[in-house]
Amino acid sequence: MAPHDLKRGQVIDGFRLEGALDPGGMANFWRVTGTKAGAPTAPAEFPMVMKVPLLRRGEDPITIVGFEVEQMILARLSGPHAPRFVAAGDFEQPYIVMEFISGRSLKGLLDKTPLPPDDIARIGAKVAFALHDIHRQHVIHLDLKPSNILLRDGGEAVLIDFGLSRHDQLPDLIAEEFEGAVGTGPYIAPEQVLGDRSDPRSDIFSLGVILYFLATGERPLGEPQREAEWRRRLWRDPQPPRWWNKKIPFWLQEIILRCLEIDPAERYASAAQLAFDLRHPAEVSLTQRAERRTRDGVGTVAMRWLRARKTLPRRCNSVAGQLSGAPIIMAAVDLSPQAEPLADALAVAVGRLLATEPDARVTCVNVLKMARLALDPLEDAHGRNPHLQRLIELKHWARRLAVAQDRVTYHVFEATDTAGAIVEYARNIQIDHIVIGARGSSTLRRYLGSVSAQVVAEAPCTVTVVRLSHQGNRPEAVLPTT
Amino acid sequence: MRTALFADIHANREALEACLSHAKNNRIDRYVFLGDYVGYGADPVFAIETVMNYVERGAIALLGNHDAAALEPDPRMNDVAFAAMEWTRRRLGPAHLAFVKGLPLTYEEGGRLYVHANTYAPGGWEYVTGLYAASRCMMATSAQAIFCGHTHVPMLFHMSLTGKVASFEPVDRVDIPLMARRRWLAVIGSVGQPRDHNPAASYAILDAAHGILTYIRVPYDVAAAARKIRDAGLPVALSYRLAEGH
């Protein structure tokens, strides 16, 4: 049965075709509902869509292999950032049934460019979050483009079309079938052009292309159709976004150009770190990228061209390996005078983590505890702004970490519930590891409950609790407690 | 139906017990033994009687080259393997030999073919170590999926509709979907003498209904198995290689 023979009302393996949706380039899409009879799995509770690949005789094998890859990978993904997999059919009628995502594709935004920077940061952070979530599950998308990104009505980004994707613990059917680069001209990352399909930072490059387009209305690398033209991005950097539009803030240019770095090692080490910057524009540490007025000169480009001629595909160990080497660490610092030795010990513990993970970032957090009912004054008894004062102290504490400024950020929160604020922040920005001090045990503390104990109980990630050792007051961290 | 696949037990009692006990906790409906129950290790009687026991209860067992060599010496074997077979033959009784004599070289069901070494000459014992041998195997049968052992190195070969063959090193305990549009050749690693530099015993679970294959590594008491080999007076190299997984 050929795909174009499908009719409304027809039932395939227990799924009734309710109506055709807009076809994609390589597949037709049908809204389907579950029937009891003949269904291989129980019909899902959510709206479903059936993707039917267009497998014609003599068709490019990419359609067939892409269908196999998507079937394999979608079934392994979970969470809100990919459509939920329901079922797949094979020989007689190939199809994949998955969750129907009610929302709009990012493609619709392309007519509205340039978008305001805040909107770009908001949308970009959602997409970066979605990317991080699939990277954590060992999958690299490798064909990220506006038409493959949907925004749910609730606001979350959903990535679709995993036909060119790679799961680092499953056979890479695409690499085995095709020798050249596989991807979409405007979005494909330089290392992908060289045939490297193992680096999650390739998706960060593609997201950089999208952010660039949203900010300027222009494609940073044009729209090359032929694979031979794709290689140009191995040496030619794009015009900086502010070359097109001076209203683009420096922080946004910094973020976009960092995503578009030719060498993956110069990009964000993880999508979570990119999301972090997009959500904290004021914290973005600006480098020469932010101020760049034009692209690199002939000399630099010629050097890169010479080098690119000899470049061979690199190998990155694994997706999970890349991510675990690029954690976001939260140092929850108690700045009260009596906790000073403990703050010293905390710095020792954080320093050790940073030393072992060169791509790690650290966010230093202090919570300014507010009285529950009273309106807190903007100034303390000495006429100082307590929030600003804490920020200064926090930065002072972090000086001894001896780490590049672009790897550290600082946050002072005002909250009635210290532990709750720490846990909520950790959840919102996908912190990988919290390091927090415990002030030891006193009768009062046992009675009131300690902040660190609550953080350990509720945190969505690994927690290291730092204590002063009992023998004397040496600032010695006691590791690990999780 | 969930099938547990075991290959190249090679008289290693500790490894076999560890794998069977792992399988028992994983809802297994049936057992397939892909040959080479004896040779190298110090517990040939235990290994062969365990397999006989499972066969009585419906398991499938195939003939391996070391099992065949228990019946009749194989001059192509290297010195160490040959010496171990001489030692083994002295320990097997008539019932064990009769069981081995009755073992088939291949078994086929529902598009799946089980064999010890290869499909194109099952009794010739050639190894499937590369893409060429793998594609020969797939050409020699119409089965969609082939399961074999013999190399002691877990590996998954597959062929696309366009005839391209590729290999993949399976990752411990990751479910691999065996898609129906593709042909598969799964080399199950060795229970009793792994040679991929990982000393843990190797076996696999096939969920045929869902088309999912999962390779599994099981740690076991390597020191005990190695000590028995030395105590039995078998070539001492056979004990060292267990710890190295080589």
Image: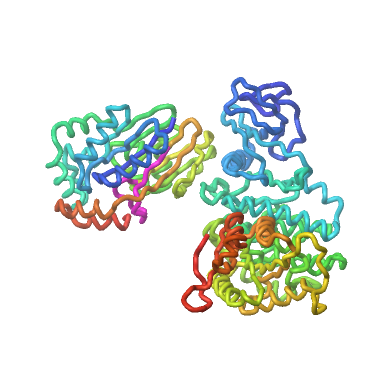
Q: In this view of the protein, which residue sits in the foreground, A244 or A282?
A: A282
Q: Quadrant of residue A437?
A: bottom right
Most common SS among magenta residues = loop
Residue A302, horizontal then vertical, whole percent: 68, 73
- Report the side of B221 relative to A444 (left or right): left
- Report the side of A276 relative to A473 (left or right): right
* Label total for image: 0
Residue A278, horizontal then vertical, whole percent: 74, 61
Q: In this view of the protein, which residue sits in the foreground, A418 or A310?
A: A418
| Residue B195 located within the stretch drawn in magenta | yes
The furthest residue to the left:
B90
Residue at image location 73% in from the left, 62% down from the top: A415
Residue B208, horizontal then vertical, whole percent: 46, 32
- Quick check: can you spot residue A204? no
In the rendered view, tell whether residue A318 sits above or below residue A289: above
Q: Which stretch is magenta?
A: B190-205
Residue at image location 73% in from the left, 53% down from the top: A126
Q: In this view of the protein, which residue sits in the foreground, A290 or A65?
A: A290
Q: Quadrant of residue A289?
A: bottom right
In the rendered view, tell whether residue B105 sits above or below residue B16: above
- Report the side of A385 relative to A5 (left or right): right
Quadrant for the N terminus of chain A in the image: top right
Residue at image location 68% in from the left, 51% down from the top: A130
| Residue A230 located within the stretch drawn in magenta | no
Q: In this view of the protein, which residue sits in the foreground, B194 or A454?
A: A454
- Report the side of B171 relative to A380 (left or right): left
